[in-house]
Every structure is written in C-alpha cells, then in structure tokens.
C-alpha cells in the first residue's frame, strides 16, 4: 500500500480543518496556483488533469473553475471533505476520489494530459521504493503525450541549511486568528515535522490562545534522487520549472 503511512495520514486528517492557516489568504493562494498551472496547461495544449494528492483542493479547485476536466484524489478523507466543501462554496463541480497513488490506475480507468502531485505529497511516503512505485503509478495515469508534475520541498536547500523552525503566514478569519509553527527534527532518512496549530479566540475584551500539535514524517527527496527514480520507471526527461513556493519538476513519459 503506497499511501502515507499511518502517522502521516493521521496528521493530514488532523490538520485538514486548519490547513488554510499555512497561507495568508487561502483563496488567493488557490487563484495564484491556478494561474501558474493554467499557463503550463495552455503551453502543452492540455485539457484533462489528475491531481493525485489534491488535499483541500488548492490546485484542483481553481483548475476546475477555469474549465479543465479535473479529478482530485487523496488518501485523507478529512482533506477531501474540506476540498468538497470549498468547491461547493465556490460553485465548482469537482470529482473527488479517496485513493493513494498506487491505487489510481486501477480506480480511474482513464488517462490524463497532466498528472500532478504538488504540495510535497510525494514525500509523505516512507522511502525510495514507495516513491518509485508511486511514480510508476502516476506514469500509467498519463496519456502517451502527457506529462507528470511533481512539487516537493526544496530538500537540497533544507538539508544544507537544516532550519529547526518554520512559521506559516499569519491568517485571519472572522472571529478567529491563527498561525502554525513547525519544529523540524532531522533523522537519518526522514524529516520529522511537528506542527503546533495556534488559534487566538476572543469573547468581548477577553483573548486566549489554544495550541494543538500534529506530527508527520517526510522523506527528504533530493533533486538527484528524484531524477534517478523517475528514470527507473521510464520517464524520459525531468525538467525543473520555476515556482514561487516549492521545487517543481516536469516529468515526460
């Protein structure tokens, strides 16, 4: 089973309702992601998209809103629930499928012009063998003239600098402010991320904070290892694309 192992799946179920706190303005972030992907899709003449780790819909929803044929998939039922609610709020018709990477070829029965996995979804697998199996599955979901787009943390930079703390952009919603502070611990073959979800709530003149932790284990996939693994499953080329938030690679079968 090549889905996030149990602690990681539990992490995403736990943070789903607070996931927007990673962004200053989640709706604006969705719009920006949609514009970035729209330019790439137009360049390739693509119409159909599989978002293989769609989470709360940050890429899938804006693409569907722009008129692309989109299927969103994710193993986290809570993340899919939030994606469904957000799509309904924005009046977007979006098909959502609960599935891990390796389940997708058998579950969908169709291929796509572009298969994407952004937001570091690939690195929630436990190691290179699972990543290899996942890339192989995503390749089988691509049409012969299609492509796969992988977005991960820039682990080459992270492993060089080894930061210990990461704070999300501040966020504000009616009646509640919040942020997420992450503590990063480095194991021999994983990055352990503990997110502390901080919420500020007010009632009249009173203000208090609540804190809730959640932990996930990430495989620190470097660019060199991604290129090598992609070649092993017969992607013929890997090109890094400029992106404002993560390391993004276009893989051609």
Image: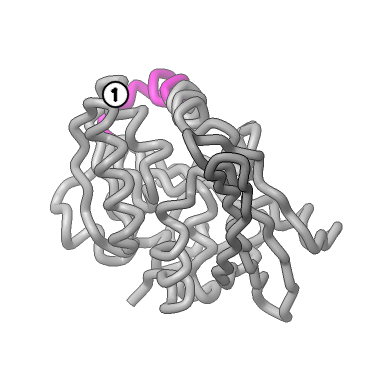
**Relative to 15, residue 193 above or below:** below
82 shown above or below 132? above
Residue plotted at (28% across, 61% down)? 77
Q: Residue at x 70, y 57 (%)?
A: 155
Mark 1: secondary structure: helix
Q: Which residues are magenta?
A: 38-48
Q: Is residue 146 above or below residue 231?
A: above
The x and y percentages for residue 66 are 31, 20
Which residue of the protein is positioned furthest toward the left in this rendering? Answer: 109
- x then y, percent, for residue 95: 19, 42
Counting from the top left corner in percent of width and height, residue 150 is at 50, 47
Residue 233: quarter of image: bottom left
For this rendering, which residue is in front, 72 or 77? 77
Residue at horizontal 69 percent and vertical 51 percent from the top: 154
- Which residue is disc 1 drawn over? 65
Residue 34 found in image quarter? top left
């Amino acid at each position: 089973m090549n889905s996030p192992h149990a602690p990681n799946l539990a992490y995403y179920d736990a943070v789903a309702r607070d996931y927007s706190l990673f962004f200053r303005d989640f709706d604006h972030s969705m719009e920006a992601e949609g514009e970035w992907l729209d330019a790439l899709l137009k360049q390739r003449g693509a119409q159909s998209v599989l978002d293989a780790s769609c989470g709360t819909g940050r890429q899938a929803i804006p693409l569907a809103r722009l008129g692309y044929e989109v299927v969103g998939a994710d193993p986290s039922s809570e993340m899919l629930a939030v994606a469904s609610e957000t799509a309904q709020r924005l009046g977007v018709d979006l098909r959502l499928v609960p599935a891990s990477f390796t389940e997708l070829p058998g579950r969908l029965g169709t291929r796509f012009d572009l298969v994407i996995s952004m937001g570091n979804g690939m690195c929630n697998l436990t190691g290179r063998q699972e990543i290899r199996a996942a890339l192989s599955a995503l390749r089988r979901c691509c049409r012969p003239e299609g492509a796969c787009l992988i977005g991960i943390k820039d682990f080459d930079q992270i492993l060089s600098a080894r930061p210990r703390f990461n704070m999300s952009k501040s966020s504000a919603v009616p009646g509640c402010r919040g942020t997420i502070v992450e503590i990063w611990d480095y194991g021999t073959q994983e990055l352990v991320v503990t997110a502390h979800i901080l919420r500020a709530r007010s009632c009249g003149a009173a203000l208090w904070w609540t804190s809730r932790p959640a932990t996930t284990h990430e495989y620190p996939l470097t660019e060199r290892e991604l290129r090598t693994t992609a070649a092993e499953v017969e992607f013929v080329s890997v090109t890094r694309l400029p992106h404002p938030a993560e390391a993004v690679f276009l893989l051609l079968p």
